[in-house]
Image (spheres, rainbow, N blue to C red):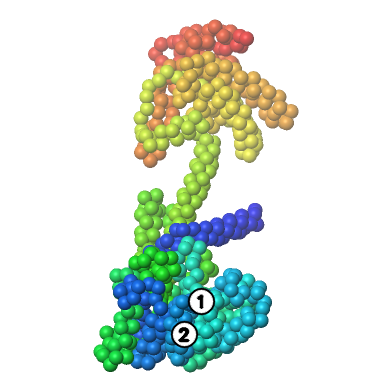
Amino acid sequence: MKQLKDIGFFVKAFLLLVFLVIITIICSYSFLEPMAQKLMIKNYTAHNKVSSENVVIIVIDDKSLSYHRWPWPREFYGKILNYLNDYANPQVIGFDALIQNTDKDNMQSDLKFFDAVGKCKKLVVGFAPAAEGAFSKDRNDKYTENFYKKFAIKTNIQYTQMYTNEAKGYGSYYLGLSEYPKQYFDKVHYTGSVSQPLTLWGYANAMEQVVIVNGKYYPSLALRMYLLANNTDSITLYPDRIKVDKTGLEIPAIVVPSGMETPLRFYKQIHKDGYTHKKYSASDIIQSYDNLQKGLKPIIDPKEFEGKAVIVGGNIKAMGIVGLEDVTPTPILEKHPGVDIQATNYENIINKDFVSYSDIFTELFWYAVFIIFVFIIIHKLPIFGAILTLIGSFIVYLIFAIYCYNKVFYIPVITPLIVMILASIFAYSYRSIVEGRNKEKIKQAMGKYISQDVMQNVVQNIDDIKLGGKRAVVTVLFSDIRGFTSMSEKLSAEDVSKILNEYFSEMEPIITKYNGVINKFIGDAVMAIFGEPIQDLNHPINAVKCAYEMLKKVEALREKWLFEGKPKIEIGIGINTGEAFVGNIGSEKRLEYTVIGDTVNLASRIEGYNKVYHTNLLVSSSTYSYISDIADVIKIGDVQIRGKSKKMDIYEILHLKN
């Protein structure tokens, strides 16, 4: 039995674990958890820190259109780079734009821009990996082969892979690179990926720190800028981080099909148009460059950029042309400028502003703790106390989650609450089932001490149990075993107990059959009530029929017992019909459902006259008035009943008609 219980425990534990895993997966991949995480990041993570002044951005924005109508000649981009390279002396420059073709109508303008790119040795330009398209390995031509060789040189990183998964195992995600014009590409010194992956729910929450194209690793724009700023090109890739060998910087990252991703730590917005980093309009920079070339005072002092990281990008909203507005949904903005996201990634790296996440095994452990806690609370406390405690627990957990997001430690927000709610529903359902089973067991057990009908009456009126009752006309039946005392002296207590138990076991169903209720066993005697609590208009007739069948059953038992060597047993039965008090008597702490009154006493005394007249079944005249048509009787007249001043008639039932 113990082994079966142990097996049952392990089965329940296993089912609980499966439940936890299923809930975690459902909640993690539903919209609820990401939506809650977005709210937490926006309100409690991003708002508690402002970006540093060491990372700034130059944006080709709506204001820039006042300098020159769109499209711009590319020499304007060259002026921005010349301003930074010739006058500002920034630490590193990132160019968040893709140049994929030349302007055939204004090639001289393009060449001026390309020359500026070539002169800027601190510049990292953006490229985009692609699932297919230009420079895909599928082309397999000489030009493509030469391009990849040059591209590897431009990327110029040495990586060591410290985990078993082969890079080419993930290479099927990106098959090609964005195309560069040859004149432009020849001038580029360094490149970095500007890819911004989206989650399943359509917003950017991480950056591909390295991407894999055809089995080769390429760094992000921000990572390549960091390597250039620190004069190194060596990184080591671990399953959970990227390490820059020279500086010792470790960037947390996870392996994904496209490469290695790092969660972004967002900052507080400092501009109405959604930027979280200090920004400058490209038109101000170009005009400043023009002024400096003429010996005039610049609009923006180049010293503002000295020693800083500068990222140049475009984000024009006014014209509404697809491709000019470079925005991506993030947890803090529906339209987050792409150049600002690149700046965020770079600042995360240089300031080590990395996000920490709870791992799945820790989460499952705490979900198990939450479920156990819920079960204990529901088991130990009443329902309202348990509900208040659980609501308080929800609030405490939300406060804890807010604290974690303030500390840039991301934990599940909705999933634990859903787990606790489902655990509460499960616990209450389980409790209800268990209590129902226990109540049924109690009813079955108590039904062996009191009548099932009395038990049902108690259960139906469980909230209105009190002392008192009512007066009602009932029929009371007393039966007694003849010579029980002398029989007890001859047999052992165990043998007497067996005989009585068998006798009572045979009598009980007969009494129940005729709507009778056993009120009590008194030694070898049985007291039964007809008419209450089971409503029965024919209770006198049914009581007599019951008594008659009891006598027939005793005859059968007597033959059986004689064959078994047990003593001969006979019973006497007395029945009386009349008014009596029916209900609960006793004290507030101990009740007994019974009948009391002269009707009960008279039935008991009539039963005693069976010994006097050597009969088995006697009824009072009040009972006889109900059964005169169905029974053959012998009238025993003028009987003096103890406790009665007048004599009365009693009747012996010989047999029942039909």
The earlier-in-sequence mark between 2 and 1 is 1
Please give the name of the residue rendered at 63% of the width and 77% of the height, measured from the top-left corner.
214
Which residue is denoted by mark 1 in the rendering?
Answer: 101
Query: Where on the picture, by quarter, is residue 655?
Result: top right
Q: Residues within 10 Å of mark 1 (few under 14, many from 20)?
A: few
- Work out whether 235 lies above or below 369: below
Type of the residue with mark 2 = Leu
SS for callout 1 = loop
Q: CA distance from mark 2 to mark 1?
A: 12 Å
Query: Where on the picture, by quarter, is residue 314?
Result: bottom left
> Which residue occupies the foreground of this view, 350 or 104?
104
> Which residue occupies the foreground of this view, 455 or 213?
213
- Work out whether 376 lies above or below 656: below
- Work out whether 183 lies above or below 359: below
Image x and y of residue 599, in percent: 43, 19
Query: Where on the picture, by quarter, is residue 508?
Result: top right
Quadrant (top left, top right, bottom left, bottom right) of the C terminus: top right
Image x and y of residue 455, in percent: 48, 33
Image x and y of residue 45, in percent: 37, 71
